[in-house]
Structure formats: structure tokens, C-alpha cells
Amino acid sequence: MNGLSWIVLFIVLIIIEIFTMGLTTIWFAGGSLVAFVLSLLGLSLPIQVIAFVVVSVALFLVTRPIAMKYFNKDRVKTNVESLLGKTALVTENIDNIHATGKVEVNGLEWTARAEEDGLVIEKNSVVEILKIQGVKLIVKKEEAK
């Protein structure tokens, strides 16, 4: 692989990154750039390939967590994600055995199931939303404070 191949690979990876913006190929673009420089210095192909791999992996491991934090800081949670950890009011007894249970959160009614199967949570109780399975909220009774 000559220097031209490394620079072509670099350009292709950058173009892919521009179109996807997924932080998936940028690390390999950095590795190909280093391999290109090594090819210009006349180093052998095995050294170029090793440098490509080492630099790509190092860039991925060192800079990806920082980049993900920076690029995801303005990410807005979906409505569903924003429910996790919130409290809801039980509007119909929650009983997993009898497949009943409804809660109201943010003015909307949701089907709800208790975290524990044998537990019945009475109407007008306050529950915490733990997770979402399909269109059902999985809840636990909130501890008295």
C-alpha cells in the first residue's frame, strides 16, 4: 500500500463520517493519516499497518468518551425516556397476577405493572417509574419520606 492509498482511505473515511455524523470512522481516518505520513518517510508496509491499527484504537479509546460526552450534551430525551425516575399516581390497582393497573403521569394515563409479581399496589398510591416495557410502565411503590 503506497501513500496514495492511505490518503484515499483517509478521504473516504472522512466523507463517510461527514454523511453519518456517528463518530464511527473518524478514528480510522486518524490512523490512515499517520500511516500516510509513515509511507512518505519510506517505512515498510507492516509498520504502516501496525501504526494504522494502533493509532486508530488509541484514538477510539482515548477520545471517544470525551467526544460522545461533548456531542451528546444537547441530546434531548424522548418523552418516554423522560418518564424514568418520575413519580406517578395509581388510578387503578396494580396487580400483575390479574393483569390490571393504570397510573397517571404528566396528565396521561399509562398501563402499569409492578416490579414484583406478587405485589398489589392500591389505587391513589404514589409510585416511581423504573422502566418501560413496550407500552407499560414498570413501577414500584414509593417509600414514605
Image (spheres, rainbow, N blue to C red):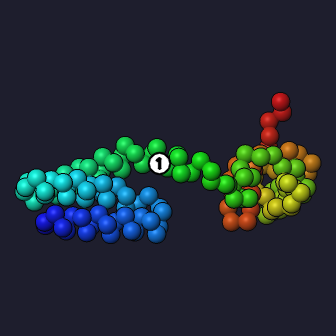
Disc 1 marks which amino acid?
Ala
Choose between 80 and 3: the one closer to the eye. 3
Identify the secondary structure beneath mark 1: helix
Q: Is residue 86 left or right of residue 36?
A: right
| Count of number-bearing discs | 1
Q: Is residue 138 left or right of residue 54?
A: right
- The x and y percentages for residue 98 are 81, 62
Q: Is residue 22 visible?
A: yes
Q: Quadrant of the N terminus?
A: bottom left
Crowd band around label 1 with a 10 angstrom C-alpha radius: few (<14), some (14–19), many (20+): few
Choose between 140 and 54: the one closer to the eye. 54
Q: Quadrant of the C terminus?
A: top right
Q: Residue furthest front?
A: 40
The residue singled out by tag 1 in the image is 67
Q: Residue furthest top?
A: 145
**Residue at x 82%, y 61% (from the top left corner):** 110
**Residue at x 16%, y 58% (from the top left corner):** 49
Choose between 41 and 59: the one closer to the eye. 41
- The x and y percentages for residue 16 are 40, 68
Q: Is residue 109 left or right of residue 23?
A: right
Q: Is residue 131 left or right of residue 127?
A: left
**Residue at x 74%, y 52% (from the top left corner):** 83
- The x and y percentages for residue 17 are 42, 64
**Residue at x 44%, y 65% (from the top left corner):** 18
- The x and y percentages for residue 125 are 88, 45
Q: Is residue 121 visible?
A: no
